[in-house]
Amino acid sequence: MNASETSTFVSADGGGYELQMGRWSRRLAPLLIDFAGFSSAECVLDVGCGTGSLSFALMQNPEIGGICGLDRSAEYVEYAERRNNDARLRFQVGDACRLPFPNGSFDHSLSMLVLQFIPQADLAIREMRRVTRPGGTVTAATWDTRGGFVAHRMIFDTAAMLDERGMEWRARSLVRPMSRPGELQRVWLAAGLRNVVQDVRTIRMDFACFDDFWTPAEGGEGPIAEYVGALESDAKARLREAGRLAYLDGEDDGPRSYAATAWVVRGEVP
């Protein structure tokens, strides 16, 4: 990775992201908003908005005057803009580590499922604090990739059983920053935020069948697709078959539901 890169998340297509993660982000977003704890605001910032799940959930509250969703991916921003029909909400391309806003521009800032992919996450957190007014909150969620992200881990655990490179990718993808107990709280305190609280929120990822589970792995979004896309055709076929057996678990193909747990944190700007 080049030192100038500010994200390691592979992004190519908004529709592909919706299939890979957007459908689950929509389930997590209301839980994160409830945890953030504010009922009204003049303006709220969504950092790393992706295809807009959190921004659109915030828009359901008529007591929020304006919402800005920012993401480094022009493809995701364009996808979100096409779905937007509310004048309170705007999307723009931007860098979480260099937010293009003056100090204290927002009442509250939130970030959902993006900090783990920002190599300088501490800088992004300080930027969120900078653009949030005193007394406002900075809130975020990250997946518990090691202990609470079942569907994600199923594929990488399977890959690790098949070859050494799969083992390396599993370590890279599961042991991410901001995924350990207490880690978000520590970095929030280090950023100078006060009254910091860390907790967990869990959703279910429901799949209709194995194809529904596997198809995102052959797309172009995120770490699983990045790994699978780099495999030769024979290795990809072996992984798919091993993943299918893990999904079936000795039963017929059909619906499955897996828990997905996120760490959540919030703190106040002094």
Image (cartoon, rainbow, N blue to C red):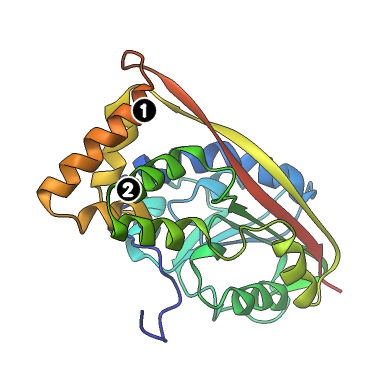
- In depth, the one of 135 and 112 nearer the eye is 112
Secondary structure type for disc 2: helix
Q: Residue at x 51, y 43 (%)?
A: 25
Drawn side of residue 104 relative to residue 242, left or right: right
Q: Position of residue 130 (x, y in %)?
A: 71, 78
Q: Residue at x 16, y 41 (%)?
A: 237
User: Where is mark 2, residue-wise?
Assistant: 159
Secondary structure type for disc 1: helix
Q: Residue at x 58, y 42 (%)?
A: 148
User: Where is mark 1, residue-wise?
Assistant: 247
Q: Residue at x 45, y 60 (%)?
A: 171
- In depth, the one of 200 and 138 nearer the eye is 200
Mark 2 or mark 1: whose residue is earlier in sequence = 2
Q: Position of residue 203 (x, y in %)?
A: 59, 34
Q: Quadrant of the N terminus?
A: bottom left
**Which is closer to the viewer, label 2 or label 1?**
2
Residue type at the position of mark 1: Tyr
Q: Residues within 10 Å of mark 2 (few under 14, many from 20)?
A: many
- For residue 74, say whether it is visible: yes
Q: Quadrant of the C terminus?
A: bottom right
Q: Tell me which corner region of the image, top left, top right, bottom left or bottom right, holds residue 251.
A: top left
